[in-house]
Image: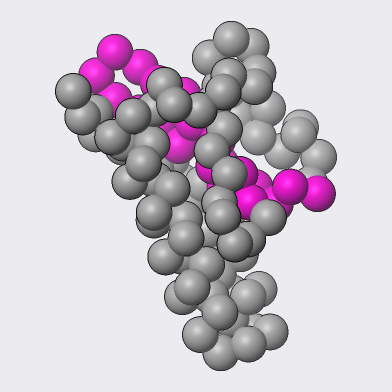
């Protein structure tokens, strides 16, 4: 059963900052980044259990294909909450504190 995906405000901020960073480097690259993240989020929405648990037995991570980002999320009974979209080189504390 498909569960609705809820993107928390912190994750939206992560997306906005990453989009702006890529867009400032090359025009159009930010849009490509968002397309990659959207594809991962659609996959999470279809089958969240496909991705490994990475923290406290509840946080899962899905990696984007082209960009070095992970989409961190928590699956609840009736929804899936995205808690962060974080660059692979950033400290895990960034998203761990959001659980």
For this rendering, which residue is in front, 2 or 92?
2
Q: Quadrant of the C terminus?
A: top right
Find residue 23 and report its horizontal and vertical position in percent. 58, 81
Please tell me in which quadrant of the rendered image residue 44 appears: top left
Q: Is residue 17 visible?
A: no
Q: Quadrant of the N terminus?
A: top left
Q: How is the image coloured?
A: one colour
- Tally of numbered discs: 0
Determine whether 96 is above or below 56 in the image.
Answer: below
Could you tell me what secondary structure mostly forms the magenta stretch?
Answer: strand
Determine whether 94 is above or below 99 in the image.
Answer: below
Find residue 38 and report its horizontal and vertical position in percent. 39, 56
Determine whether 52 is above or below 21 in the image.
Answer: above
Find residue 61 and report its horizontal and vertical position in percent. 57, 32
Q: Is residue 83 magenta?
A: yes
Furthest residue toward left: 1
Find residue 46 and report its horizontal and vertical position in percent. 28, 34
Q: Is residue 69 left or right of residue 94?
A: left
Determine whether 27 is above or below 75 in the image.
Answer: below
Q: Is residue 6 left or right of residue 84?
A: left
* Residue displayed at 56% across by 51% down: 64
Furthest residue toward bottom: 27
Q: Is residue 20 visible?
A: yes
Q: Is residue 8 magenta?
A: no
* Residue displayed at 76% across by 32% down: 93
From which residue to which does the magenta span run?
A: 69-89
* Residue displayed at 64% across by 11% down: 56
For this rendering, which residue is in front, 48 or 56?
48
* Residue displayed at 52% across by 58% down: 15
């Amino acid at each position: 059963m498909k569960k609705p995906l809820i993107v928390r405000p912190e994750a939206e901020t992560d997306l906005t900052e990453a989009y702006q960073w890529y867009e400032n480097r090359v025009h159009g690259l930010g849009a490509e980044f968002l397309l990659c993240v959207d594809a991962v989020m659609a996959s999470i929405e279809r089958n969240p259990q496909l991705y490994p648990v990475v923290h406290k037995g509840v946080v899962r991570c899905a990696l984007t294909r082209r960009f070095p980002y992970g989409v961190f999320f928590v699956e609840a009974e009736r929804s899936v909450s995205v808690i962060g979209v974080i660059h692979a080189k950033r400290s895990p504390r960034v998203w761990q504190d959001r659980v």
